[in-house]
Image: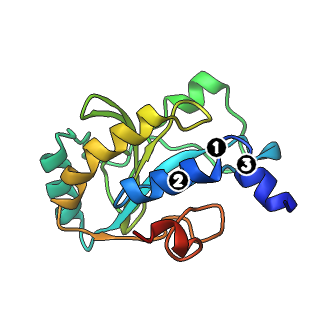
Amino acid sequence: MDAWSRWLFEEHAEMQLRAWARRLRVFRFVRAAGGHANDGDRLLAAFGYPSLQTLEHAFASLGIAPVRHRVVPPQPEVGRAYAGDVFAAFASLIPGSLIEQPGWQQMHGGPVFVWCGADEIRFSVADGYGVTDANVAHAARIEPALMALGLEPIDPPVDNKHCISPRYYPDYFDA
């Protein structure tokens, strides 16, 4: 087994990843980069959105209450150091808007991390740094609501071999 395969299957057997791939329609297992990246494995689904109005409609459909600002709230200055609690008090805005990033939300019985770019929304499910069968079941419960939004899925949500997707692992998705 080569180094990449050892890393990919270190936490989950290949058969388990294949089963998860076949079970999920839009969520994809993403293997952590590891090392000093301080990232973790996760299940990730991403969708493009054409306008802020469409995004706000998606929020309403999912029960996400957006936090809106009338003016740009104070933002951190690039290159300036802040204590952790001070930095955490800054509002993270969705690019091109005065709406705060949704962050952690409760959806279909569990936590989901929701983050928006200028034209895409991402949903992430994990237990800390890892993915469990319970996370896969949770993601499967969320998928119908995400598919009902009518947004275009971005597949793969991470365009590299860390993402178990039809582009990089087509045989994992064969019936």
Q: Is residue 102 visible?
A: no
Q: Quadrant of the N terminus?
A: bottom right
**Image spot of residue 121 (x, y percent):** 36, 58
Q: CA distance from mark 3 to mark 1?
A: 40 Å
Q: CA distance from mark 2 to mark 1?
A: 11 Å
User: Which amino acid type is shown beneath numbered disc 3?
Assistant: Gly
Residue drawn at x 32%, y 58% as measured from the top left: 97
Mark 3 or mark 2, earlier in chain:
2
**Image spot of residue 156 (x, y percent):** 49, 69
Q: CA distance from mark 3 to mark 2?
A: 34 Å
Residue identified by numbered label 2: 29
User: Which amino acid type is shown beneath numbered disc 2?
Assistant: Phe
Residue identified by numbered label 1: 12
Between label 3 and label 1, give the one nearer the viewer: 1
Residue drawn at x 58%, y 32% as measured from the top left: 87
Between label 3 and label 2, give the one nearer the viewer: 2
Mark 2 Cα within 10 Å, few/some/many (few <14, many 20+)?
many
Q: Which residue occupies the extreme top position in the image?
A: 85
Mark 3 or mark 1, earlier in chain:
1
Q: Quadrant of the C terminus?
A: bottom left
Residue identified by numbered label 3: 79
